Image (spheres, grey):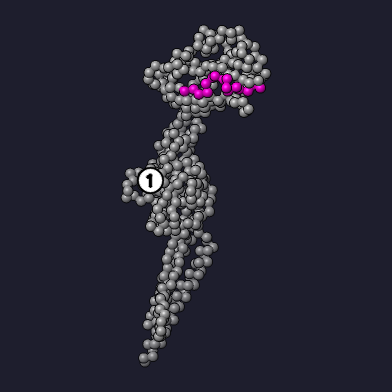
Amino acid sequence: MSLNSALAAGASGLISNSSALAGISDNIANVNTVGYKRVNTNFFPNYSLSSGAGDVRYAAGGTSTLSKLDVSTSGLLNPASSSTSIAIDGNGFFVVRPNPQDVTGFDPVLFTRSGNFETDSGGFLRNSAGMYLYGWPVASDGTVNANPSNIDQLEAINLSNIGGAAEATSSVRINANLQASQDVSPAAATYDATDPALNMASGAVTSDFQRTIQIYDSQGGVRSLTLSLLKSNNPNEWHAELHVAPPTDVTTGTDFNSGQIATGVLAFDTNGQIDAANTTLPSTLSFLSSDAPGPLGAGQFQWAAATGIGAQTISLDLGAAGTPGGITQYDSPSTLNSTRVNGAIFGSFASVDVDKDGFVSARFTNGVVRKIYQIPIATVANPNGMATAGGSAFFVTPESGAFTLNVPGAGASGSIAPKALENSNVDIATEFSNLIITQRAYSASSRIITTADEMMAEAIQMKR
């Protein structure tokens, strides 16, 4: 009868509003939880009306609820002090798993916006919910194999395996001026770079200008290159030699002696700028490793066997006409203004940084910064269709669609916000308003039950 359906409708109102209250309670309780996504409870009716002829008695169907997480709405980003606290500015999720090692196909792949990561006892990055952050490892040449769907190429990000680092010199920039009015030395008439009795590297000929530049080898050791210059009898031209000091640090081919690794001339135009077309001093120095096999050919050189160091290639930048810096020839005293040499001696691991492109970089005490991981951003077609796995983590469902791994900022994915955390997307004012509405609705549903009970009591009393 209709009174019974009214009782059932009142009871469904109590149950549904209790469910709504539970969601509101969680939202309020987690207003300060990093990356929390609010619960949104929707009510829908259960009534069923049929049309047709005749007297149709209405039976109340009551109401039911469906609770969904509002995953697609982002919270505000707040600054954080830790370098491993990160947030996503835009769409997407961090890829996390419950275990950092020995994962199998049975271990779930989860997604979260909770970026309050800290290192655990093993050096792995783990958030406050115990989920480990995964990323693409960066190869030694700086490349990343960023596969959009292969989860097996991700590794749990570990900071404990980072040892010290040294960086071999790969670039030397020389800023200097050679005096245009320099007198030509009598030795210039007989100068011969290939003859140790007539060149500068051996010390037989006194150079007009000589400076030593320190570089770093593959093990972070300091090596010395000496640039010696002698003004030529030809206008706007200087004989040049580069040699290693001491010469026992290198082994050279037949074209070199006394530790030489490059010879040639520096040519200048009438404006005192370097003339690259007529300059023959090489712009690239290629050291073979100390254990390189076989005899050396003409123009080749390697680190001496006793040094035990690896190969390296150094770009020698002498400047170009029309650009500031480099080597010039003006009528002012010869001077070395500056040298810019990259590379570094050995340094210990000091700290870690994360940039907006998701690169996790190790910073060392010698100033070297080395990229070690890149954090991917996972996106799905329907974030609100994801299911919760607890701890502000989610997993994909048929309703959400499959995930795609993106480089931060690529496609529909957001970028990384370093030293930031995402607040919950709970609006406390809205939740308090819903709390009042739910309380009133619950009380009203209870009145349905008491009223239907009184009416049933009246019907029973009619028998007496």
Q: From this view, report whether residue 457 is shown above or below residue 110.
A: below
Q: What amino acid does circle 1 point to? A: Asn
Q: Quadrant of the C terminus?
A: bottom left
Residue pictured at 54% horizontal, 19% vertical: 281
Residue found at the far front of this picture:
277
The answer to whether 361 appears left or right of 205 in the picture is: left
Magenta stretch contains residue 181: no
Can residue 226 be seen in this snapshot?
Answer: no
User: x and y percent of residue 449 in the render?
Assistant: 42, 78
Magenta stretch contains residue 272: yes
Residue pictured at 32% horizontal, 48% vertical: 105
The answer to whether 183 appears left or right of 160 in the picture is: right
* Circle count: 1
Residue pictured at 63% horizontal, 15% vertical: 235
Can residue 311 be seen in this snapshot?
Answer: yes
Residue range in magenta is: 271-286
User: x and y percent of residue 458 in the render?
Assistant: 41, 87
Q: From this view, report whether residue 430 is shown above or below residue 217.
A: below
Find disc 1 in the rendering and name its residue.
150
Q: Secondary structure at mark 1?
A: loop
Give the main secondary structure, helix, strand or loop, of the magenta stretch.
Answer: loop
The answer to whether 240 appears left or right of 52 in the picture is: right
Residue pictured at 60% horizontal, 16% vertical: 237
User: x and y percent of residue 120 in the render?
Assistant: 41, 44
